[in-house]
């Protein structure tokens, strides 16, 4: 049988495994394989001809398998060290893993070293990880004998005739579906990160277990680089910087909603205004729609049936009404209120209105997970023949917007699932046009076969921040369903009524969340156009205060957010304060500057300063802000 690995044609003998294919293709340090969208273990026989991806640690799926085996190693170590420990569940992802367990005593960070050392022993023993399939009855007997009551609960939920897979490594056995590494050996470096409480099955009436978090790498060097990254991420944590830079706060009286301080409000409005300006260039029309609706609308949109538990529902005049979690139903209503011609399309409604979604209080996380937010949301209503051009335009806007922040991004295309709405020809054509638009934009993308929503295919965009972390932000979603539910129509050229296609799209996604990501991406040192304060004037002594205020006033007249520090403090102290506040430009003024009408300019992050005429500096700064320059000083050099 022939398979393709890395573009190489490989002939595999009957019964050969994915591990054999990896060896023949000379892939270094293989962890697992992927074929037909499924992850396979290296020990499994190759079943089909065709494309095989051999997964290494560089692949997110490869890392997930690696961490998955690591979580079993951690469980094995804990069982050795804490007799009587009971295991619940231990999931993994590309970043790390955790395991929920019941332990004879509360663990703390001081216990981690011993567990890590035991894990290192298990890895060094290089136990083969062996899969076995047994009957439900045999599984019940096995895990009863081990006293694993949580595992028993999982097994008892399975049907009578279920075939159950277990995995053995050394003396340890665990209930698991896999897939796993072939042996424990590759897990060369491990680190336990934290321990927290977690209810069994997320149920507050059940026992509180201990959730032990860790991560692992094929080498010490890889682990160390990752730990440095975590340190840096902690330093950049937007909740911490949000407090330090006085951007936003949270309060127990309104969980999941931010209080925007004056500095944060400036940032927020700059983002919104940037989006507004870009979208106006592309013919978007901004609208404002209600944020509380009667159930009729939610019934038409289908939210009442499928999304109600995520909505804030309130009573008003003996009637139940709900706050909107998204703008689409309102925009559909607006579209349907006028007679639309084929010439009017595409129609692009943009809205920045308030949205709210119920999130469990335990999942809230700074600005990254909130209950109250706003999106740079828009809905495009277009004819079927406009899908390709419409998507190409959205991709262009994405590159303009992310480009302004220096953010790289990667793209995923999700296609028709098994259950879908609409004509298969329309789906095929739409998917073809999405792919063609991505190709024309020069974007490489990953295809998630069958991962689209039932109502349409979609493009998801993940931005990559300065630390290399990925954040899902933009979505571009084709929708064949809403136009149907809202009976949207336009008059076509032949005079007949036709159904438009709808596109949901947001580039920032939630502005709150995007702002949180930007705070961490820039570590609070924003480009000048975003900075709450853009220039701060520092008089050398009291007698230069009047000139400092004059400089500030002239800058303000240009629309620059300038301030001056007139406190009775030493100059060095004021410079340090401005640095802590990450102000882009410090303007020191003393006798000479006052006499000559100049300013001594020091850009953020630089030691040297240069003296410029007041007007020349003001002009250059205005230019830097107006062009939304990413780097400081681009226009200053010309001044
Ligand atoms: Zn497993
Ligand atoms: Zn929408």
Image (spheres, grey):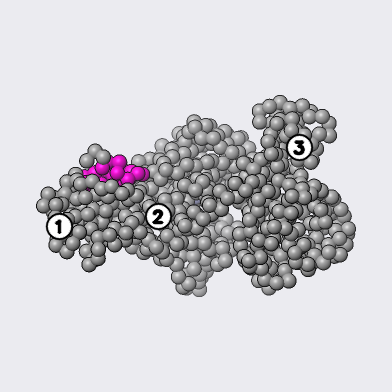
The number of discs equals 3
Report which residue position mark 1 lands on: 547
Q: Is residue 550 left or right of residue 162?
A: left
Magenta segment boundaries in residue numbering? 617-636
**Magenta stretch holds residue 79:** no
For marks 3 and 2, the one nearer the N-term is: 3
Place of residue 321 in the rendered image (x, y in percent of width and height, measured from the top left): 50, 66
Regarding residue 477, the answer to whether it shows in the image is: no
Quadrant into which the N terminus falls: top right
Place of residue 286 in the rendered image (x, y in percent of width and height, measured from the top left): 37, 50
Residue sitting at x 15%, y 57%: 547
Mark 2 Cα within 10 Å, few/some/many (few <14, many 20+)?
many
Quadrant into which the C terminus falls: top left
Q: CA distance from mark 3 to mark 2?
A: 47 Å
Q: CA distance from mark 3 to mark 1?
A: 75 Å
Report which residue position mark 3 lands on: 19
Secondary structure of residue under mark 1: helix
* Disc 3 C-beta below 8 A from ligand 1: no
Place of residue 597 in the rendered image (x, y in percent of width and height, measured from the top left): 13, 50
Q: Is residue 605 left or right of residue 92?
A: left
**Magenta stretch holds residue 618:** yes
Q: Is residue 394 left or right of residue 584?
A: right
For marks 1 and 2, the one nearer the N-term is: 2
Secondary structure of residue under mark 2: loop
- The residue closer to the viewer here, 387 or 209, is 209
* Disc 1 C-beta below 8 A from ligand 2: no
Mark 3 Cα within 10 Å, few/some/many (few <14, many 20+)?
many
Regarding residue 67, the answer to whether it shows in the image is: yes
Report which residue position mark 2 lands on: 524
């Amino acid at each position: 049988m022939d398979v393709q690995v890395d573009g190489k044609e490989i002939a595999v003998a009957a019964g050969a495994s994915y591990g054999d294919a990896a060896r023949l293709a000379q892939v270094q340090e293989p962890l697992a394989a992927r074929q037909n969208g499924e992850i396979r273990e290296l020990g499994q026989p190759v079943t089909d001809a065709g494309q095989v991806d051999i997964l290494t640690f560089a692949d997110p799926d490869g890392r997930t398998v690696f961490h998955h085996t690591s979580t079993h190693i951690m469980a094995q170590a804990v069982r050795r060290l804490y007799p009587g420990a009971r295991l619940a569940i231990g999931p993994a992802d590309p970043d790390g893993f955790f395991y929920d367990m019941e332990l004879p005593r509360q663990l703390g960070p001081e216990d981690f070293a011993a567990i890590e050392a035991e894990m290192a022993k298990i890895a060094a023993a290089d136990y083969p990880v062996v899969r076995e399939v047994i009957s439900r009855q045999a599984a019940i007997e096995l895990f009863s004998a081990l006293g694993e009551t949580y595992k028993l609960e999982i097994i008892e939920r399975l049907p009578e005739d279920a075939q159950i897979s277990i995995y053995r490594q050394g003396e340890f056995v665990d209930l698991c579906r896999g897939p796993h590494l072939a042996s424990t050996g590759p897990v060369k470096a491990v680190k336990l990160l934290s321990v927290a409480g977690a209810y069994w099955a997320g149920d507050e009436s059940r026992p509180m277990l201990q959730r032990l978090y860790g991560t692992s790498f094929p080498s010490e060097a890889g682990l160390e680089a990752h730990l440095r990254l975590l340190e840096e991420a902690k330093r950049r944590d937007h909740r911490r910087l949000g407090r330090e830079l006085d951007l936003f706060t949270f309060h127990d009286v309104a969980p999941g909603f931010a209080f925007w301080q004056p500095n944060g409000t400036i940032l927020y409005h700059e983002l919104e205004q940037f989006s507004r300006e870009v979208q106006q260039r592309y013919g978007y029309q901004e609208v404002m729609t209600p944020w509380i609706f009667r159930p009729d609308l939610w019934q038409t949109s289908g939210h009442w049936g499928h999304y109600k538990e995520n909505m804030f529902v309130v009573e008003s005049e003996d009637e139940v009404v709900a706050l909107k979690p998204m703008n689409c139903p309102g925009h559909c209503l607006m579209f349907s209120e006028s007679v639309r011609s084929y010439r009017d399309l595409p129609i692009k409604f943009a809205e920045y209105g308030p949205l709210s979604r119920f999130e469990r209080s335990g999942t809230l996380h700074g600005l990254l997970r909130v209950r109250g937010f706003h999106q740079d949301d828009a809905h495009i209503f277009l004819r079927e023949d406009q899908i390709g051009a419409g998507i190409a335009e959205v991709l262009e806007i994405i590159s303009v917007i992310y480009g302004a922040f220096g953010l790289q991004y990667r793209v995923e295309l999700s296609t028709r699932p098994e259950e879908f709405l609409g004509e298969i020809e329309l789906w095929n054509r739409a998917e073809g046009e999405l792919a063609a638009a991505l190709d024309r934009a020069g974007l490489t993308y990953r295809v998630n076969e069958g991962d689209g929503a039932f109502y349409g295919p979609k493009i998801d965009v993940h931005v990559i921040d300065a630390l290399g972390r990925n954040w899902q932000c933009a979505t571009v979603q084709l929708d064949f369903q809403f136009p149907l539910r809202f009976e949207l129509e336009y008059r076509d050229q032949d005079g007949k009524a036709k159904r438009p296609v709808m596109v949901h799209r947001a580039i920032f996604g939630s502005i709150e969340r995007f702002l949180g990501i930007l705070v961490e991406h820039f570590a609070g040192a924003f480009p000048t156009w975003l900075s709450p304060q853009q220039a701060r004037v520092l008089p050398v002594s009291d007698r230069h205060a009047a000139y400092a205020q004059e400089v500030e006033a002239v800058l303000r007249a240009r629309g620059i957010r300038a301030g001056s520090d007139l406190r009775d403090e030493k100059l060095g102290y004021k410079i340090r304060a401005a640095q802590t506040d990450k102000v882009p430009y410090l303007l020191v003024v003393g006798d000479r500057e006052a006499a000559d009408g100049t300013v001594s300019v020091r850009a953020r992050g630089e030691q040297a300063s240069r003296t410029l005429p007041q007007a020349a500096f003001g002009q250059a700064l205005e230019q830097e802000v107006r062009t939304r320059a990413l780097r400081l000083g681009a226009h200053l050099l010309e001044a």
